[in-house]
Image: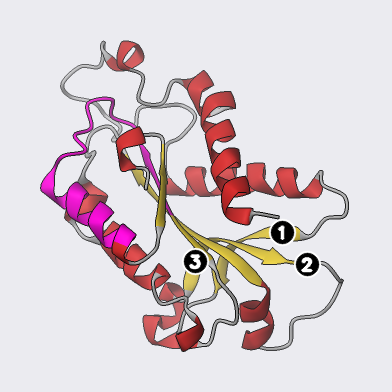
Amino acid sequence: MDMERVLKNEFENWIVNYCSKYRIADKKLYSAVPKKTWHNSLNQFLKTEADVQCKFGGYLELTFMNKNPTEYTVHSELPIYDKSFGSHGMRVDLAITEVTDPCIWLNEDDIRNSLTAAIEVKYENYRYPYEEFDNGRIRRDIEKLATLTPENGYHQKIIKIMLIMVENPDFDSDRISVRETITLAREANVRIFSNITQLMC
């Protein structure tokens, strides 16, 4: 299975079949928004980063479970990174592992050997559409993903994805912090998935 192609196709299907129904970043829907809003995020479907994480992760899990035999499963907050990142920093937003045979994971290598893809998730809400770029959080996630290499004890090629959902339809992909982040992702061999086409790489 070409997992990278599968993930890209499933993300695009999720955007078209689910997110488009709720009109994320739809200029017509958001044209009536007043200057001041109570919520940072205005959409009913996606309000937080955790929403993106659980809804896309759940969508992927259903995709894998419907295949026979089931070879992959999706995890949330799985500790895959080096311990130097701290107890919380070790955890990736979404991980895909290979589970061809039922078994018990007894140590760190069991996870590393089964790890197929790592996905970090960020959500740029309507009111602050560049916050995650400008404060460096997306950059830090990309740098963490870049450490998932054989040189660091990971025993296979791991697909590394930075998933960025943007709510504001007037998002400027030419902003300096955005362009620098895309460049960093390319240099680190990290794919960017986004509902904003200009961010995809």
User: Which residue is denoted by mark 1 in the rendering?
Assistant: 73
Q: Check if residue 188 falls in the magenta segment.
A: no
User: Which residue is denoted by mark 3 in the rendering?
Assistant: 92
Question: In the displayed image of the protein, which residue is found farthest to the front?
Answer: 2
Q: Is residue 5 left or right of residue 185?
A: right
Query: Which of pointers 3 and 2 lies earlier in the amino acid sequence?
Result: 3
Is label 1 in contact with label 2 (beta carbons under 8 Å)? yes
Helix, strand or loop at label 3? It is strand
Helix, strand or loop at label 1? It is strand
Amino acid carrying label 2: it is Val
Residue 67 spot, x, y in % from top left: 82, 47
Q: Which mark is residue 181?
A: none
Amino acid carrying label 3: it is Val
Residue 45 spot, x, y in % from top left: 49, 29
Residue 119 spot, x, y in % from top left: 50, 58
Q: Estimate the spatial distance between the alpha carbons at disc 1 and disc 3, rounded to whole Å.
A: 14 Å
Mark 1, Cα crowd under 10 Å, few <14 / some 14-19 / many 20+, is some
**For the magenta stretch, what is the residue range?**
162-186
Mark 3, Cα crowd under 10 Å, few <14 / some 14-19 / many 20+, is many
Query: For the N terminus, which image quadrant?
Result: bottom right
